[in-house]
Each structure stands twice: as C-alpha cells, then as structure tokens.
C-alpha cells in the first residue's frame, strides 16, 4: 500500500470516528441496535473509550518523560514542564532552558509523519518564571482525490498548539501556574468530505498547575514532590458548521516523586502519575432516553464535572478511566542518566499498555535525551512502537 492510500485510510477512519463521536454527543451516547459503524460496535461490546478532538495534546512531547512511561506531574523541572505541570518552572535550577524534540510517527508505515515540540522558559527571579512552547503534528505531504479518483491537489494536513505559561512560588515549597493555549487543527485543508464543507478547527484552552516539594531529613539527602495539573480545559472544537463541536482532551493529572542521593555522584528518582480525562463517558440509550450514564451534550465545564460520575457501569467504570504512569530516573554525576517506565490504560478505555526505556547525556549547557517504546498489549495499537525519539536541550 503506497503512502497516499495509507494516509487517506487513516484520515477516513479518523473522520469516521469523529463523526460517530459527534453523533453520539448529540444525544450523549450510543443507541442500542443502531448501526453506528466501527465505534458503535465497540461501544455495544462493552468498551467505551472516551473520545475527544485533537488527541495529539495528550501525547508525551519529550524524550525524557517518554522514557519514563509518560510521567511528569512531579518530576524534576525542565523546559518540558510546560506540558506536564508548568508550576514546576518556578523551582527550576537553571536560569533558562530551551528544548526541541522530534518524534517519528507510524514510522513502520510511512516516512514523513512526525511530532515536533519546541519549549523554553526564563526565570524572571527566584520566585517566578515564564515559559512558552509549540507542539506541531505533521501528516506529511499527500494527494487528495475525489470520488472519481481525480486529483484535488497536494496538501499538508497538520495540527499545532501554542502555549504561554506563568509559574510563581507561593511559599518556599509550593508553587502554582496558569497556561494559555491556542489550538489549530487542519486535517482536511478545506476540502469537502462527502457533502460536508470543512475548515480548519480552532480552539482556546487553559491549564492550571500546583506543585509542592520538600526535603526529607535522613542520613542520605532525599526529597519528595507532589504535582497536580488540569489541562486543556476550554472551548469545544469542530471541523464544520454542520457538526456538533467536540470536546478538547481536558485531563486531570496527579503525581508524586521520591528522590534520594546515595552519595555525591549517584541519584535516583521514582515517580508515578494518575490521569483522568475530564470528558463525559458515552451513555447508553433506549428509545431516545438515557438508561445508563448521563447525557453528554453539555458544555466543557459541566462535562469536566460530570466525567467523575457519568459512566454507565458506575464507579467500577470510572476507575477504568484512570490511566497509570510509573517511571524511574538514575543520574550519575549529573552527567549520564538511565530511565525506564510503564504506562497502563484499561483495555476497555483504549488499551494503551507499553514499556519505555531511555537515556540522557549532559555536557556543559548541552543535554541529549533519547526514548524508546515497546508495546505490551496483546493487540498493539501505539503509533510510537519501536520508535526512537530524540530531544536536544540547552541550559543556561
């Protein structure tokens, strides 16, 4: 299968899923017995993944966190903290840090789909910092064709998000942050899908973060940290005036870290994150009425609140919607790092399960990080599997 056919197939499936998700949100769920395509069959079989627009906003953008099972709520601060928890920036040790990460996407199928991430921060003073980042997802160059296989031209579908963050220490051990985000998703390049005219989708969102760190009195210098971030809470998004707007991937991340120094040369950290999408779970309907769950045709704030109690199977299903990240990071002389981690998501909520590995090397102001992902789910569905990601950072 050539590249164009692969991309068209992927875009077609994405638009099918998006359309099914939108139709579900009109009434808030799936009607039993109604033919709603692939997604509808999944929901009828008992799996209810929570679908959103612009899912690229949830992808680990950097190699350091990517090597530790996508953990980052309370990891030690760096420029990538803008994505994970910007409140950490106020505790950053360096005055300035700039980082760039390149992640090949679906590398086993096509050569030019990729995710790029550029981020940096500046310490205004000892108590505050500002940061900015750019996330860019490219689907490469592709030839669009109509129903008669007549070429409509070459296009470059893409998505990007621009962030600006501010972090401030409220006490010597506690900080808070706020991040503003502009999002643009242009998957169809203005083409008509079927009989539906489309356009580039745009939205605005905000993050709020909290971070606490403290020393532990012991024989060996040790510390712990706790972090919380609510991200991507904002307006809904749509690719057409004829479609109901879709939820952004609003997310609650809560995590902790424990760090100990064996001696002046050896340091190790253990981290864990818990994630919960703040988006309504698809309900189950009969005769046009909700019989299990809650109506999902609500606003973003109501949807975030409702996401804690709207699962058709009750509390058990709510627990299934919590994904877990766990990772470890070992540093030798603050020059060489080794990392590993694991990510788990319930099979009925997406089934992303994978091991991650990586390393880091720091020389003077230059830092190089790499990450590698190996899927462990029986049915592998991760586009980053067997892919090497690379980050390059400059600390001043």
Image (spheres, rainbow, N blue to C red):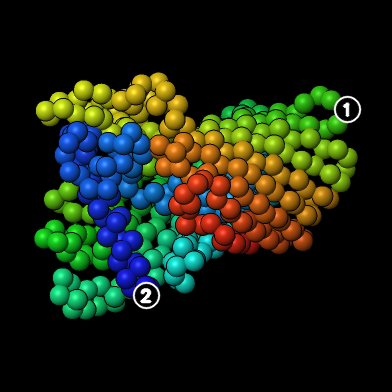
Q: Position of residue 3 (x, y in %)?
A: 38, 73
The image position of residue 28, as x and y in percent, is 22, 33
- Say which of 126 and 47 sits in front: 47
Query: What is the x, y in percent for residue 361?
Result: 74, 58
375 over 273 or under it: above or below: below
Residue 158 placement, left or right of 131: left
Q: Between marks 1 and 2, how big is the CA–CA gap?
A: 61 Å
**Residue 30 drawn above or below residue 204:** above
Task: Specify whether residue 366 is in view.
Answer: yes
Residue at the image position 34 percent from the left and 24 percent from the top: 313
Q: Earlier in the sequence, mark 1 or mark 2?
A: 2
Estimate how packed mark 1 is, as few (under 14), some (14 to 19) or many (20 or more) residues with alpha carbons within 10 Å.
Answer: few
Q: Position of residue 213 (x, y in %)?
A: 67, 31
Kindly state the secondary structure of the residue where label 2 is placed. Answer: loop
Q: Residue sitting at 74 percent across and 31 percent down?
A: 223
- Frontmost residue, 369 versus 43: 43
Q: Which residue is mark 2?
A: 2
The mark lying in front, picked from 1 and 2, is: 2
Give left or right: position of 170 versus 184: right
Q: Quadrant of residue 81?
A: top right
Q: Secondary structure at mark 1?
A: loop
Within-10-Å neighbours for mark 2: few <14, some 14–19, many 20+: few
């Amino acid at each position: 299968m050539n590249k164009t056919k692969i991309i068209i197939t992927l875009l077609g499936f994405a638009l099918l899923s998006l359309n099914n998700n939108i139709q579900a949100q009109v009434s808030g769920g799936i009607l039993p017995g109604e033919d709603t395509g692939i997604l509808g069959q999944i929901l009828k079989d008992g799996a209810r993944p929570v679908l959103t627009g612009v899912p690229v906003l949830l992808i680990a953008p950097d190699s350091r966190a990517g090597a530790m099972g996508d953990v980052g709520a309370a990891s030690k601060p760096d420029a990538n903290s803008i994505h994970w928890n910007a409140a950490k920036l106020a505790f950053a040790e360096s005055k300035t840090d700039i980082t760039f990460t390149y992640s090949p996407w679906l590398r086993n199928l096509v050569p030019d789909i990729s995710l790029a991430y550029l981020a940096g921060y500046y310490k205004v003073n000892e108590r505050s910092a500002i940061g900015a980042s750019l996330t860019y997802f490219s689907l490469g160059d592709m030839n669009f064709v109509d129903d008669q296989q007549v070429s409509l031209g070459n296009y470059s579908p893409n998505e990007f998000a621009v962030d600006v963050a501010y972090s401030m220490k409220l006490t010597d051990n506690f900080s808070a942050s706020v991040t503003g985000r502009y999002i643009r998703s242009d998957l169809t390049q203005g083409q008509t899908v079927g009989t539906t005219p489309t356009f580039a989708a745009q939205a605005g969102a905000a993050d709020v973060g909290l971070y606490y760190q403290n020393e532990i009195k012991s024989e060996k210098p040790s510390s712990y940290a706790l972090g919380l971030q609510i991200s991507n809470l904002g307006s809904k998004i749509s690719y057409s005036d004829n479609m109901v707007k879709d939820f952004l991937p609003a997310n609650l991340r809560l995590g902790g870290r424990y760090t100990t120094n064996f001696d002046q040369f050896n340091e190790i950290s253990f981290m864990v994150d818990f994630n919960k999408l703040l988006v309504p779970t698809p309900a189950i309907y009969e005769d046009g009425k909700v019989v299990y769950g809650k109506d999902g045709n609500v606003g973003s704030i109501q949807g975030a609140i409702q996401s804690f109690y709207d699962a058709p199977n009750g509390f058990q299903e709510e627990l299934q919607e919590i994904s877990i990240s766990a990772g470890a990071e070992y540093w030798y002389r603050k020059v060489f790092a080794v990392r590993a981690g694991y990510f788990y998501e319930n099979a009925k909520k997406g089934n992303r399960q994978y091991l991650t590995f990586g390393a880091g090397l720091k020389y003077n102001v230059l830092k190089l990080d790499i990450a590698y992902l190996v899927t462990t789910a029986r049915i592998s569905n991760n586009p980053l599997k067997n892919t090497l990601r690379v980050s390059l950072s400059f600390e001043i």
